[in-house]
Image (cartoon, helix red, strand yellow):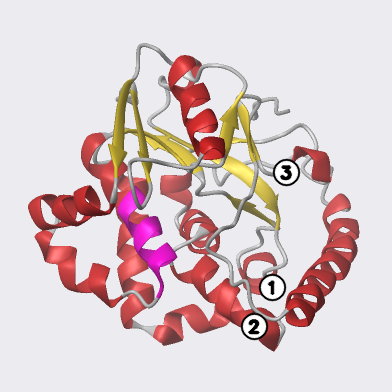
Amino acid sequence: MVQIPKRIIQTGNQVQQPLRNRAMMASVKLLNPDFEYKFFDEEHRQAFIDEEFPEYRKVFDSFRLPIQRYDFFRYLAVFKHGGFYFDLDIMLARGISDLVEFGCVFPFEALTVNEFLRKQLKMDWEIGNYGFGAAAGHPFLEAVIENCIRAQKDPGWVRPMTRGLPYLSRSEYYVINTTGPGLVSRTLAENPKLAGTVEVLFPEDVCDQKNWNCFGDFGVHLRDASWRSKGNYIRRQFANRWENLKMQSLIKESLKLGRTRQARQGANSRETC
């Protein structure tokens, strides 16, 4: 198996980041001193698309929201260069050298409220896209990229992923299911052969919410969610309330399946925070 190169990729609108982001970026670099570090600001992202993936320029520009372009870029950057991508709100607790032996690594994120994943694809959990690693040209990332393009061109393909969602949350779940973790998780569930090439960083207990949003036992995703709408306060509270109530019910369902999970065709579980 081709190993993941020792390279870390991050991106932001500008090189000079707020102090909080700089602190987390420093932790990523200091804990991995033998890794090459690449940072892409807006200018470098645009140049990357033009130079490396000109065939995707129209698709890239057609995304409705900036976060979708960020998502699409991260898949393309790792697919091209290989390495690990991390959002700027990731705090690592230790170095990630142990993970380079795998061809592709994604974190378990949480149990899912998505009815299509649960009922149609028999997968009650999702993987995250806030941090992941892969060898250059990995076929799973290629499938993710193809699905991002498909979601952009064919709204009907996305529609099943939105069933059962409250109207007030649809705009956020639109992002999640067209370029975000919902789409990545769907790609995993619908491609069992590819899933066998992906190391998922599962916790010992997927039903314990303390284990959610961790990058294995290597770090934690602080979930700044700066891309989410800062709109009507009441609307946001309603959406959060619905998701919390829905999740408490779904956790009870998931407990019936046990506390451990495996990616399709079996991925080795790893201890988390």
- Tell me the SS state at disc 3: loop
Residue assigned mark 1: 115
Q: CA distance from mark 2 to mark 3?
A: 24 Å
Q: Magenta span covers which residues? A: 65-74
- Magenta segment includes 233: no
Query: Which kind of residue does numbered mark 3 sit on?
Result: Trp
Residue 235 lies left or right of residue 126; in this view the side is right
Which callout, 2 or 3, points at the residue further toward the start of the chain? 2
- Tell me the SS state at disc 1: helix
Q: Nearer the viewer, mark 2 or mark 3?
A: 3
Which callout, 2 or 1, points at the residue further toward the start of the chain? 1
Mark 1 Cα within 10 Å, few/some/many (few <14, many 20+)? some
Residue assigned mark 3: 212
Answer above or below: position of 183 versus 130: below
Residue 29 lies left or right of residue 201; in this view the side is left
Query: Which kind of residue does numbered mark 2 sit on?
Result: Arg
